[in-house]
Amino acid sequence: MLYSEFVQGTGCKENDHNYNVYKNLEIMYMNSDMSKAEIYEYGKKLVDNSKSEEEIRIENEIKAEIEDHKKEVARYKEYIEDDTEVMNWWKEQGDKEMVQMKRNSIKFWKEQIKCHKNKINALKWVLG
């Protein structure tokens, strides 16, 4: 059994503690008729997947960035509502130029929302 197989089978992180667990379980695997699946089940109970302070800090920064993007999306949605209301007023007034200007503005805000949502999805992917 390879260490990479153990990591994949148990879903553990690669660190010194988990490597030592692997070495001990590898000896057990080699000297018994236990299957890899059985070894992985034991391993899942013994491995340490706690996060380091650095991992926690980075995760919190990413979560804060996601929240910032969500706030921007909400703000841009308000802009769209406002521009739609103004555009409808200009329609009633019969000013096609102002209506087109507001349509362009709404299109811009929708594109901005799309960009922020893409960033949110990318950051969520990083978090796993």
Image: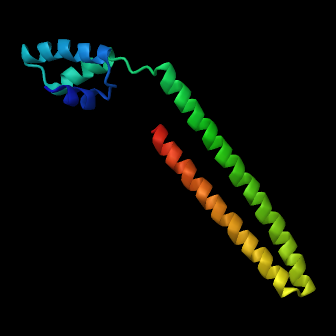
Tell which residue pokes out farthest to the right in this image: 93
The residue drawn where x is 89% and y is 88% is 94
Picture layout, residue 21 above or below residue 97: above
Residue 69 appears at what percent x and percent y? 65, 48
Picture layout, residue 43 above or below residue 82: above
The residue drawn where x is 28% and y is 26% is 10
Figure quadrant of residue 48: top left
Picture layout, residue 57 above or below residue 128: above
Residue 68 as seen in the image, left or right of residue 57: right
Q: Which corner quadrant holds the C terminus?
A: top left
Residue 71 as seen in the image, left or right of residue 22: right
Name the foreground residue: 84 vs 16. 16
The residue drawn where x is 20% and y is 25% is 3
Residue 66 as seen in the image, left or right of residue 83: left
Q: Which corner quadrant holds the N terminus?
A: top left
Name the foreground residue: 36 vs 111. 111
